[in-house]
């Protein structure tokens, strides 16, 4: 493909997991990829090529976002995948305001700030039916589970942002929500890191046993059910390449099953199932 006509996509959070898998899946599909990460060293192992730019980007820093926009000025950037995010877990009554704020700064405020910063470039470059804004939310943007309040809330907010943006600009640039179920990535390791002193805080509370059970269950579930980042990336690629992409892409059978169960079951039954499975 002639260099000047190559379409480029910028992806946030490419140091691991879905973001990293997206880089190779998109390159294989003849996209140019602006792979971004907070620490440029995390992108060093990506195979070099004319179809790759490595750019430093922390979605919570206006300065970092502005530098990334400048780095993309010479590219025909037509699409953005807002993938960066992490999970702040913990029983809501023990969560500190700063933990909730930090969760929203990355998963919600950062996502919108990046979108607003790159939208003018995408508008300028995209041919008809080519532009794309893709938000990676979660099945936890459709339903809430215990002990994941900050994360549930952030992903519900991402759904609302995508729905609103779609109403505002969707006829010009399609806005697609991607809602994965469990994916085997660094997500769960990062989650433990984001706890801080939470294991200390739960000691002696009704959540101590619940959290221990939760961890055991999550580990088992992750081992049994989690899909690969590559599989998730291939689903997201469809949102980039289809002429008329769907509004929402649910990834993983358990995400579809849980969404269906919540929709059809009486609320009291749904809550009973969740409380019981978490030992609450
Ligand atoms: N894994 C799952 O089961 C699952 C399920 C549903 C939805 N998701 C969503 O999928 C997306 C990707 O997650 P993943 O599973 O691939 O997890 P991951 O392997 O932990 O990747 C998350 C990425 O987000 C980046 N990130 C975090 N904070 C950032 C910031 N302030 N600025 C820029 N980048 C930042 C991380 O970079 P660092 O290395 O610098 O921290 C990392 O590259 C997330 O939005 C997550 O919520 C995941």
Image (tube, rainbow, N blue to C red):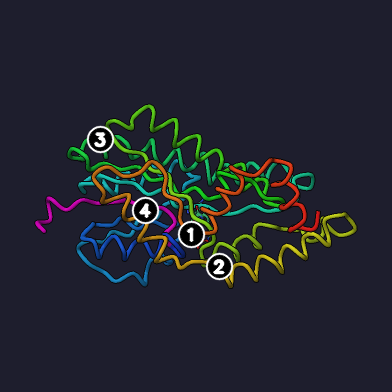
Q: Which of disc 3 and disc 2 is earlier in sequence?
A: 3
Task: Check the picture and name the quadrant holding the N terminus.
Answer: bottom left
Q: Secondary structure at mark 1?
A: loop
Q: Secondary structure at mark 3?
A: helix
State if disc 2 and disc 1 touch (CB < 8 Å).
Answer: yes
Tell me if 271 is positioned left or right of 35 in this view. Answer: right
Q: Secondary structure at mark 2?
A: helix
Tell me if 102 is positioned left or right of 124 in this view. Answer: right
Distance between mark 1 and mark 2 Cα atoms: 9 Å
Query: Mark 3 packing: few (<14 Cα in 10 Å), some, or many (20+)?
Result: some
When the figure is inspected, residue 270 is found, relative to residue 228, above or below; the finding is: above
- Determine which residue is flagged by label 1: 252
Residue that appears at 37% across and 69% down: 44
When the figure is inspected, residue 128 is found, relative to residue 237, above or below; the finding is: above
Tell me if 86 is positioned left or right of 276 in this view. Answer: left
Viewer-nearest of labels 4 and 1? 1
Viewer-nearest of labels 4 and 2? 2
- Determine which residue is flagged by label 4: 11
- Determine which residue is flagged by label 3: 123
When the figure is inspected, residue 119 is found, relative to residue 183, above or below; the finding is: above
Distance between mark 2 and mark 3 Cα atoms: 39 Å
Q: Is the shortest distance between ligand 1 and the CB of mark 3 under 8 Å?
A: no
Query: Mark 4 packing: few (<14 Cα in 10 Å), some, or many (20+)?
Result: many
Which range of residues does the magenta coloring cover?
1-14
Viewer-nearest of labels 1 and 3? 1
Residue 188 visible: yes
Q: Which of disc 3 and disc 4 is earlier in sequence?
A: 4
- Determine which residue is flagged by label 2: 225
Q: Nearer the viewer, residue 265 or 52?
A: 265
Residue 102 visible: no
Residue that appears at 33% across and 60% down: 54
């Amino acid at each position: 493909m002639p260099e000047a006509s190559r379409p480029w996509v910028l992806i946030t959070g490419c140091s691991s997991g879905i973001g990293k898998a997206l880089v190779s899946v998109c390159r294989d599909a003849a996209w140019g990829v602006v792979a971004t990460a907070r620490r440029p060293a995390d992108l060093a192992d990506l195979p070099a090529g004319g179809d790759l730019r490595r750019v430093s980007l922390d979605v919570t820093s206006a300065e970092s976002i502005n530098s990334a926009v400048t780095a993309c000025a010479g590219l025909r950037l037509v699409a953005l995948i807002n993938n960066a995010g992490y999970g702040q877990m913990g029983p809501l009554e023990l969560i500190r305001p700063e933990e909730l704020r930090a969760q929203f700064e990355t998963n919600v405020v950062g996502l919108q700030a990046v979108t607003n910063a790159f939208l003018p470039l995408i508008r300028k470059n995209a041919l008809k039916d080519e532009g794309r804004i893709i938000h990676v939310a979660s099945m936890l943007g459709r339903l809430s589970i215990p002990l994941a309040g900050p994360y549930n809330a952030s992903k519900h907010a991402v759904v609302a942002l995508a729905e609103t943006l779609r109403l505002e600009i969707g006829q010009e640039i399609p806005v697609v929500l991607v809602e994965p179920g469990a994916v085997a990535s660094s997500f769960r390791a990062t989650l433990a890191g984001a706890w801080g002193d939470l294991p200390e805080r739960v000691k002696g509370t009704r959540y101590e046993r619940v959290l221990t059970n939760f961890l055991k269950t999550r580990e088992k579930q992750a081992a049994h059910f989690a899909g690969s980042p590559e599989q998730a990336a291939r689903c997201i690629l469809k949102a980039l390449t289809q002429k008329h992409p769907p509004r929402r892409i649910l990834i993983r059978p358990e995400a579809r099953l849980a969404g269906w169960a919540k929709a059809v079951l009486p609320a009291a039954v749904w809550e009973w199932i969740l409380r019981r499975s978490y030992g609450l």
